[in-house]
Amino acid sequence: MIRWTLVPLALMTACVKENDDSAALPFDLLNGDPEDETDIEDEDEDEDEGDGCIKVNGSGGYSTINAALDASEDGDVIALCGEEYNERVIITKAVTIKGPTSGEPAIISSTSEDQTVSIRSDNVEISRVTINSNGNGIYIRDVDSVSLRVVSFGTVGNTAIRANGSTNVLIQASDFLNLEHGVVHLDEGGSLRIVNCYFDGIPGYATRVRTGATLSLEGNEFYNGVEDTDGRNAAARASDDAYLYSTSNVYTANPGAVILASDSLVQSIGDEFTGGTHAISSSDGPVVVEDATITHPLMTGIRAYSTTGDVTVTNTTITADPATNAFAEAESWSNGKADEGVGIYAAAPGMITLSDVSISGFNHGGIYLARGGTDDVIAELTNISLDNIGWHGLYIQESEATLTEVTVTNLRVSDAVGDTLCTKVGEYGGATFRSATVDWQGGEISKGSGLGIAGLQSNMAFSGVTIQENVCAGIMNYEGSLTVDDSDFSAPSPHELGASIVNWQASESSLTNSRFVDSGSIAAYATAESGEYTYISYQRMGGDFQAWYGGTHTVDGNTFTTGARGVYGNDVDLVVNNNTWSDYSQYGALVVDGSITFDDNEFTSSSGHLLACIRGTVNSNNSNARDTVVGTDRSTETYSMDGTLLSTTPENYAYPALYSEACDTTLSGLAFVDTVALAALFKGGTHTLSDTTVLRPNTAYYSNSAIEFYDSWTRTTESGFEFYVDDTQATLTDVDISETGFGGAIKHIGEPDEATGVTSSLHLINVNLSDLGSDGLEAQNVHLIAERTSINAASGRGVVVEGGTLTFTEGTVDQSTGYGFMLTNTDATLERSISQNNTYDGVYASGGSLVATENTIKLNQNHGIQLNGVTATLSNNNITDNVGYGLICGSSTFLACDNTFLGNGFGPTDSCDSDCFGDLIIDDTGDTDSGMSATDDSGSADTGDLDTVAPDTPGDTGVEDDSDTGDAALSDVAKMP
């Protein structure tokens, strides 16, 4: 393998291959400034007598150049007259041959097929001559220090200047026009400089260097190159281990690659390129480009595929015309054509360095980087600007890449891509990485028609990057890893995969300390046809962070403002901590078929969920939802068959602040304040809630309870409605619910199993429910256990249980506007609890069983206890000061022993019957009555006609019952990704 050594031209004294003693030496810059032409100006010379006008050192009069050469010695100066010399000149001495500076030119012509001028000596100078030849114009062989200045060529049958194995050759201040076979051919380890020359209309290769030789082009102008008969064209062609240095040249209107190289080193500094298929096209050798301006290449700006050295491009601007650049009409891109239609295509075995580079207008890519060896290439990109690029702004594969302040804007993708635009990864993107390691610091990816950044099997890290207004995802992490820190995101696509960050089958990701703004926009999310009408539904769409199918993903310390969908995970493990959301329409975080840890987050002034889960697990601590609002961004448009818009129907909606469907949750330290709908909705699953506060839920017109549990629900799918049943087991500890709007506090609707009966449970410990807009605690077909639970000021019933069981211990029901307890077909146990100051009965039970022990039931506006067809055991209860009876038995069977009745308005009881009912009955006068019947306050037997305070229908409190099954509370979860 060849190891290249790059030497700045200003300091170059040698340019050799390491370990190659035969390598050619470079130009000897001590020979004088090639731009200083004082040594080729006319001198005052004395003319000697002779037949011709050629002089040697100012003397003689030779008629042929060869005669003058014969008469000269090393160091002599031969001056030619302005005439044509028909001879073949062979120079074997270190002489200077000079033509006149004015008047007719000195022309050397030969009819031989050999070269017209052959230089076979070191230290030869030729200036101000014109050459005509049937072969090579000037041939230089195995010599050193040859200078050709102000030379020109008329007709040349082969290459104008052929230098073979010669070093320190200089061509300066010369014009080369319309030469059929090119200008310079240098090989065999030689070295040659071309300085301040003019090339126009040259077919094929204007200059060619090969086989270890070194060519330096400095300050030249190349115009209007022409393809030769074999279709070849280049201003400079380098091959076979050559060195090509180009400095401050102007290249214009070349039909092929301006600089074409293979197996060679190319260095371009300060060059200007206009037109051509490529400014530089190089294979298998190192390339250095600095301070270049490249304008409107037809195919590629710089193509540098190196297998033996590094590629470096700095301080360079590359601009293409999209109307003429390669694939202007193309509808697709393929990796096999990655080097066509791009600003820079670079591959190297070791290092690629790009800095201060601006690229615009290319139709298939801005920059494409890949490895040129067996190991991943090291790529460093600094201060890169890519604008108005097609398909891929930046494409890097098999690389360890460091990017600093890289900006990609206005990515273009063909409209023919259609609906697949956001579902294909790696085919287009502002930046695409494949099998790469990426560290990106600063910069921007914006306004891209397609993905902003796509990573395929890559490990990517971003910091301080702005990503916004890309049609599809901002960042797509496909089967790789991703870290994002301190970055800004806005305006992603409303597409299903239209999030600012998408992880797909990724191993892991981390999003920290970043900002999301305006990530939601109104868009169509569903289309349906029915009869003669088409319905299109709209809502605010767009997402921030998504993770699909595997991996652990962390979202920590970010702010989300004005959006639709925050953090979404499907079959992944999410860790979502220390984030804030405001003005969101759907959710802060949602996990499906996965797990989520959700701590110290805040969700405010939004219409969606703080947190939602479907078929997953949740562990949440110290998070809160505040000031949620009614969503107003939804609407449905109705069209006739001919496409006429018939109507637009707005739709208001409200989500629960927390939603769980077939999930297992552990929740602690949550706070729900001023939520427009219920605080939490659970469908199936196992749940533990502790240290949770719910203040003023249902602040709008919704009548849900603050927290609801359901065993059955429906979901809308593409095939229609699907019905689900799942047991719900819930434990609530140290939960406070107060000031509910139009709803109650807690509801649990169970779904009994046909074989085993009631299977769901609700367990309350130290729960306080107060100032409620409806029922305090409602359960159907549930095993309900309440320990030290307080229900105060419910605008409805305190506890409502139907079916299942109830165990209520050491609790309080106070000031309900309905029954304290309303029990229907329930096996209930009340122990050491209080039911008081309720508008209707302290306890109403119909069917089932009741065991009441050591309870206080008092000051209720109707009866203390009213039973209807209940099997009851009452013992050691204080039933006092109720407006109606202390106890109404109905048709119940019960045992009532050691109870105290005092101050009940209609007396202790109606006509109850019990084995030990008479053990202790105290009426309002303080007398002790014994016997199997009870009396009212007047001592008369109760006729049973005085129950006028009780409602006509047991259970009708006069408050609208909330029969909502919860099916509509998250009606759009199926529409969410």
Image (spheres, rainbow, N blue to C red):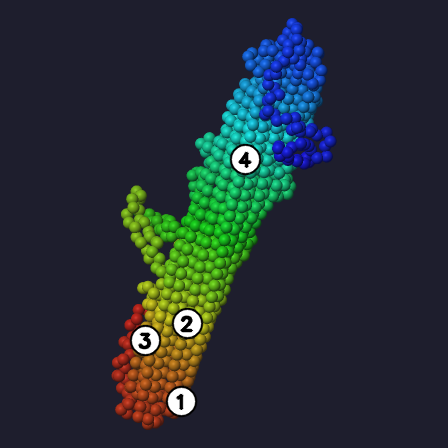
Labelled disc at residue 291: 4
Distance in Å between CA atoms under marks 1 and 2:
35 Å
Tell me the residue that label 2 is attached to: 736
Q: Is residue 294 visible?
A: yes
**Is residue 729 among the parts visible in the rendering?**
no
Q: Nearer the viewer, mark 4 or mark 2?
A: 4
CA distance for labels 1 and 3? 28 Å
Q: Amino acid at mark 4?
A: Asp
Q: Amino acid type of disc 1?
A: Asp
Chain-order first, disc 4 or disc 3: 4
Tell whether label 3 touches label 4 (CB within 8 Å): no
Mark 2 neighbour class, 10 Å CA radius: few under 14, some 14 to 19, many 20 or more: many
- Mark closer to the chain start, 1 or 2: 2
Q: Is residue 532 left or right of residue 265?
A: left
User: In the rendered picture of this protein, how many numbered marks are placed on residues?
Assistant: 4
Q: Which residue is mark 1?
A: 898
Q: Specify the quadrant of the image occupied by residue 214.
A: top right
Q: Quadrant of the N terminus?
A: top right
